[in-house]
Image: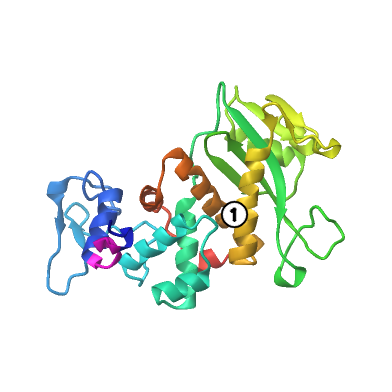
Amino acid sequence: MASVLSDPRFHNEDAAYAYVEARLWPEGPTCPHCGNFDQKRIGRLQGKTTRIGLRKCYECKKPFTVKVGTIFEDSHAPMHLWLQAIHMMVSSKKGISTRQLQRTLGVGMKTAWFMGMRIREAMKDGGMSPLGGDGATIEIDETYVGGKAHNRHQHQRGRGRGRDIPKAPVFALVERGGAVRAFHVPAVTGANLAAVVDKNIKRGSLIYSDENHTTRHAASAFRSERVNHKDGEYVRGVVHTNTIEGFFSILKRGITGVYHNVSEAHLQRYLAEFGFRYSNRSALGIEDVERSELAIVGAKGKRLTYETARG
């Protein structure tokens, strides 16, 4: 059995472009400048010094490649290295550090960091429909992630107030047997959490939470039940928050064990990364290759400049 890493797309630039084009242009090339998709009005440029994948739109007279308007735009890294980086990030359950990307890909530190941030941008599920619906069960909970104060420029204290470890609040929703969404919220208040719930959960869903008054308030517009952790109750029949706690466990192990420290300014991108892998996990029939393809499809319309990524 051949290793997936032996596939030509990971080593050959022409094969890499063809692979990305097949996923971003399933019906054929589309001009990112004017939107023209008439294949008779788009031609491939094939001069001896022409860049790989270069095409010209004969409607607006502008050249383009599949990279325009995606996370790949204006990157000097070869496309086959991008595909290697994407595969490593989607197949590593707890993530892969910038230093590891740098060593494996043989690129500079800034390039590896920027590639990772762009790939996380592609993993965002913006515009997706709300989770759940009639008969669906959603678990909601909040947690806090962070590091030591001298490693962070701005922070908000969460649980453990007064200790030396400031935390950034994270609120997450998971559909049992389905996807997860996690959000860095400015503060854990009933109003903040309710706004996330109303936008991301369909009416008719049953919500399980713990006894925290803020999560109770967030679920007040839905049918809901809760477990009382303070009294030592963690499971009552099918009522529990073990699913979302499992996601938090993966998230914290990744941030602590792989990334060590995550800036609060970039926390939402890391949440998107962990949420993407969890929502497209093997238990749902999605394996590494399919997960990579989903990340590539997500790259469209998400150009990210270095200055923007730095926040």
Amino acid type for the residue under numbered disc 1: Gln
Q: Residue at x 36, y 71 (%)?
A: 77
Q: Residue at x 26, y 55 (%)?
A: 19
Placement of 288 over or under 285, stated as above or below: below
Indicate the quadrant where residue 148 lies. Answer: bottom right
**Image location (x, y in percent) of residue 57:** 19, 55
Is residue 123 rendered magenta in the image?
A: no
Q: Is residue 42 visible?
A: yes
Horizontal relation, residue 252 to residue 162: left or right:
left
Q: Is residue 64 visible?
A: no
Camera-side residue of 282 and 164: 282
Horizontal relation, residue 64 to residue 161: left or right:
left
The residue carrying mark 1 is 268
Q: Residue at x 55, y 52 (%)?
A: 274
Placement of 94 over or under 286, stated as above or below: below
Horizontal relation, residue 262 to residue 79: left or right:
right
Q: Quadrant of the N terminus?
A: bottom left
Q: How many marks?
A: 1
Placement of 265 over or under 274, stated as above or below: below
Q: Which residues are magenta?
A: 6-13
Camera-side residue of 182 and 40: 182
**Image location (x, y in percent) of residue 244:** 64, 41
Query: How dense is the environment of label 1, judged by Cα within 10 Å: few (below 14), some, or many (20 and up)?
Result: some
**Image location (x, y in percent) of residue 16:** 27, 61
Q: Residue at x 38, y 53 (%)?
A: 292
Camera-side residue of 290 and 273: 290
Is residue 10 rendered magenta in the image?
A: yes
